[in-house]
Image (cartoon, rainbow, N blue to C red):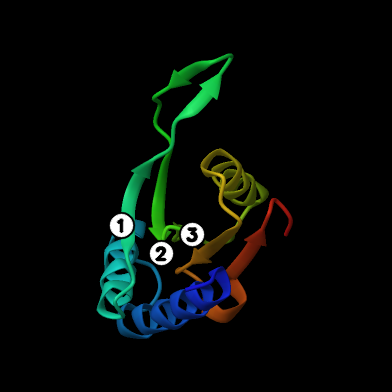
Amino acid sequence: MTENDLSYAIRGAAFKVYNELGPGLLESIYEAALKYELQQLGIRVESQLPIPVEYKEVRLELGFRLDLLVGEKVIVEIKSVETISPVHYKILLSYLRLANKKLGLLINFSSDNLAGDIKRIINGKL
């Protein structure tokens, strides 16, 4: 699947999860439910995948973890907050750069309007 195909599938799965669970739960619950929905579609999903950082030829194994890596191509960062802040975008942009991926989705499940709170970030650009 292409990044666009995966993005479409992720959005559809996110709406299923949101419609079933509603807003306001822990991020880990949405992560597990979204992973389940995507796996039901036959899509490979990895959760809490560590991302190493290289600094001056030294590999730093620190606490960066992707919420979800879908189809080995799309990073999904899940939030359950009142509003998305600029730092949430910066985190996803850093993940995209460090993992050398092209597309990321930032999804805020605590929104009253999920469609407006799924943000697509491509190659470090909003």
Q: Amino acid at mark 2?
A: Gly
The residue positioned 41% from the left and 64% from the top of the image is 71
The residue positioned 49% from the left and 78% from the top of the image is 11
What x and y, as percent, mark residue 73?
Answer: 49, 59
Relative height, residue 90 to residue 113 (above, below): above
The Cα atoms of the two marked residues, 3 and 1, are separated by: 21 Å
Return the mark for residue 71: 2
Relative height, residue 88 to residue 82 (above, below): above
The residue to which callout 3 is attached is: 73
**Depth check, front residue: 20 or 36:** 36
Secondary element under disc 2, as helix, strand or loop, is loop
Kindly report which numbered mark, 3 or 1, lies closer to the viewer in this rendering: 3
For residue 113, say whether it is visible: no
Task: Give neighbour class at mark 3: few <14, some 14-19, many 20+ (Cα, 10 Å).
Answer: many
The residue to which callout 1 is attached is: 28
Return the mark for residue 15: none
- Residue at the limit of the structure toward the front, as seen here: 1
Relative height, residue 115 to residue 54 (above, below): below
Do tag 2 and tag 3 residues touch (Cβ < 8 Å)?
yes
Do tag 3 and tag 1 residues touch (Cβ < 8 Å)?
no
On the image, which quarter does residue 52 sit in? top left
Image quadrant holding the C terminus, namely bottom right
What x and y, as percent, mark residue 109?
Answer: 45, 69
